[in-house]
Amino acid sequence: MNPSEVSALEARINVIGWALCFGVPVIVAAVIWLVLEPQRAGKPTNPEAELFQYLLLAIALIEIPVGIMMKRLTLAGKLKPRYQGAGPATPKTIVQRAYLIGYACMAAGAMYALAAHLVGGNFAWAMAMLIIPPVGYLIIRPKGDEVESAWRQLSS
């Protein structure tokens, strides 16, 4: 394991994280703002859907600890046997998969915001829910020598 390989892997992980945790919410916000909101203009919001919006918010917030847990389990090598049919399970691919799974959990919050807007029609509520994936990225992103230590641990 050479330092340039580790830094390249960390850069790739960060690009994937930015794309999923910042790009997906921007796209969803654009769809809500440009496509769905003009169609809903003048229509009253659905008060019965408020409970569903709270439920979606709770699920989106739960995605953060789920993503962290999945990342940690994968980096610890506990999910390694599950990847047997998914190609070569080298330490590099396991580290990359760990962060990809975590980022995907975070990006799911943007989809819940889209569903909340489709059901409830509350624009402000949906936009507030789109903050969850970027916050999740800031929590789950690789810090310090986390990638290198995980790679070393999985190599042994």
Image (tube, rainbow, N blue to C red):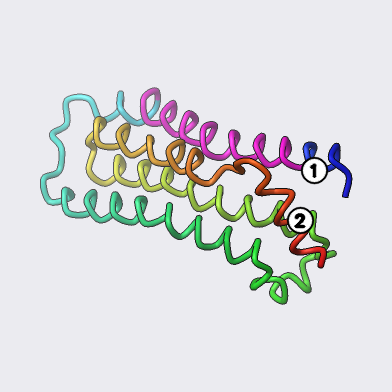
Farthest residue, direction right:
2
Mark 1 falls on what kind of element? Answer: helix
Q: Counting other residues with Cα less than 10 Å from the Cα at mark 2, is it few (<14), some (14-19), or many (20 or more)?
A: many
Magenta stretch: residue 15 in it?
Answer: yes
Q: Position of residue 155 (x, y in %)?
A: 82, 63
CB atoms of marks 1 and 2 within 8 Å: yes
- Quadrant housing residue 36: top left
Report the front residue among 102 and 77: 77
Q: Main secondary structure of the magenta part?
A: helix
User: Residue 6, labelled with which disc?
Assistant: 1
At label 1, which amino acid type do we have?
A: Val
Residue placed at 59% from the left, 55% from the top? 101
Relative to residue 76, is residue 64 drawn left or right? left
Distance between the alpha carbons at the discs numbered 1 and 2: 8 Å
Relative to residue 36, is residue 79 drawn left or right? right
Residue placed at 46% from the left, 34% from the top? 25
| Circle 2 residue | 151
| Numbered label tally | 2
**Which residue range is magenta in the image?**
9-34
Residue placed at 64% from the left, 73% from the top? 78
Q: Counting other residues with Cα less than 10 Å from the Cα at mark 1, is it few (<14), some (14-19), or many (20 or more)?
A: some
